[in-house]
Image (tube, helix red, strand yellow):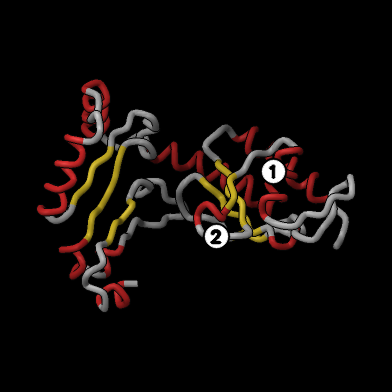
Amino acid sequence: LAAVLRGHPQVLVMLDDLYEHILFDGCEHQNLLNVAPDLRGRSLLVGGVSKTYAMTGWRIGFGAGPQALIAAMTVVQSQISSGASSVSQAAALAAFNGGLDFIAPQVAAYQQRRDVITDILANIDGLELRVPQGGFFVFCRCAGLIGRYRPGGAKIENEADVLDYLLENGVSGVGGSAYGLSPYFRLSIATDNATVAEAGRRIASACAKLSPA
């Protein structure tokens, strides 16, 4: 990726580091600038409090990058948006100054939930997945389900049909097409172990009821 970008100096790079502390299996966070520091002059690193500190909805983030770009962002932020509330800013400051000791047990809990759901999904005919090494989402390839038939006789034609069928069976996911990855669906593991396990069981049961193409 860095080699391609070097050939296109007009392209700015945005690095999303929101999940930098939510890593599994001993993995360490790396971004593009770790391997291509020469791109620093046209890169914007973005972070926030929504993932690491579970402060989704507080609307606090930050950017680090070239001075000219940050200055332009400041103009837009100050004139177009309503700005971040003082309460959110104070809470974010307290979070940043509070240390990261709480992260390890939380990450361990996420990893356990990841293991629960991936162990189930990996044994379902028609589904494929790569076990995630961070974050709190699982992407599952569902091409193997397309062409099969629901118990009522309706044919599963595409990713949207897979999602609709899962919803009928009590599991809500997000289509991979929303992220440029189709046919996939995304599941969140940002809930308790029992809910994650139950979701896996429902998916397994639903897929077992499909008739071959």
Query: Residue at image x 36%, y 39%?
Result: 52
Asked if the residue at tag 2 contacts the one at tag 1, i.e. Cβ–Cβ closer than 8 Å, the answer is: no
Q: Residue furthest front?
A: 80
Amino acid type at image mark 1: Gly
User: Closer to the camera, 149 or 22?
Assistant: 149
Amino acid type at image mark 2: Leu
Tell me if 60 is positioned left or right of 51 in this view.
left
User: Closer to the camera, 75 or 104?
Assistant: 75
Q: Quadrant of the N terminus?
A: bottom left
Q: Nearer the viewer, mark 1 or mark 2?
A: 2
Residue behind mark 1: 200
Query: Residue at image x 32%, y 76%?
Result: 4
Query: Residue at image x 29%, y 57%?
Result: 14
Tell me if 171 is positioned left or right of 94 in this view.
right
Tell me if 104 is positioned left or right of 6 in this view.
right
The mark that comes first in sequence, 1 or 2, is 2
- Near mark 1 (Cα within 10 A), the count class, few <14, some 14-19 or many ≥20, is many
Residue behind mark 2: 181
On the image, the x and y values in percent for residue 127 come to 70, 58
- Near mark 2 (Cα within 10 A), the count class, few <14, some 14-19 or many ≥20, is few
On the image, the x and y values in percent for residue 73 come to 18, 45
On the image, the x and y values in percent for residue 69 come to 16, 53
Tell me if 131 is positioned left or right of 51 in this view.
right
Judge whether 206 appears above or below 10 on screen. above
On the image, the x and y values in percent for residue 7 come to 26, 78
Find numbered disc 1 in the image and state the secondary structure of the residue it sits on: helix
Q: Quadrant of the C terminus?
A: bottom right
Q: Residue furthest top?
A: 87
Judge whether 66 appears above or below 169 on screen. below
Find numbered disc 2 in the image and state the secondary structure of the residue it sits on: loop
User: How many numbered tags mark residues here?
Assistant: 2
Q: What separation in Å lies between label 1 and label 2 (alpha carbons)?
A: 21 Å
